[in-house]
């Protein structure tokens, strides 16, 4: 009988690798982590933290916003919404 092979463990990333995956510097990642604005980590030992690559990707996807540029007209209408005539 052939049994299915066990799934490969998820890659664990150091802070520098997680930051690179997000396209930010390690310094920015540390600052975001200090403010609670970085994906949660696994604590392997007292000071050893690792991030699961899939968790970092999911965190980034959840933060994705529409990146379409705003037109001049949409800026004007947005500016006029707060004004009363």
Image (cartoon, rainbow, N blue to C red):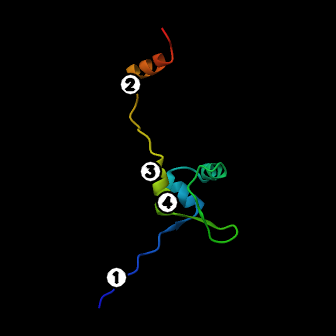
Q: Residue at x 44, y 50 (%)?
A: 61
Distance CA(mark 1)–CA(mark 3): 31 Å
Labels 2, 1: front one = 1
Q: Dot 2 surroundings within 10 Å: few (below 14), some, or many (20 or more)?
A: few
Q: Contact, CB < 8 Å: mark 2 with mark 1?
A: no
Q: Residue furthest bottom?
A: 1
First in sequence: mark 1 vs mark 3:
1
Q: Which residue is mark 2?
A: 71
First in sequence: mark 4 vs mark 1:
1
Distance CA(mark 2)–CA(mark 4): 34 Å
Q: Dot 4 surroundings within 10 Å: few (below 14), some, or many (20 or more)?
A: some
Q: Residue furthest top?
A: 85
How many numbered badges does the structure rendering display? 4
First in sequence: mark 2 vs mark 4:
4
As drawn, the label of residue 55 is 4
Distance CA(mark 2)–CA(mark 1): 54 Å
């Amino acid at each position: 009988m052939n049994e299915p092979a066990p799934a490969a463990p998820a890659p664990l990333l150091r802070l520098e690798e997680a930051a690179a995956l997000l396209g930010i510097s390690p310094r920015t990642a540390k600052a975001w982590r200090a403010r609670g604005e970085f994906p949660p980590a696994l604590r392997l030992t007292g000071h050893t933290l690792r991030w699961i690559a899939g968790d970092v990707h999911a965190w980034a996807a959840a933060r994705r916003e529409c990146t379409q540029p705003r037109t001049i007209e949409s800026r004007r209408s947005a500016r006029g919404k707060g004004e009363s005539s």
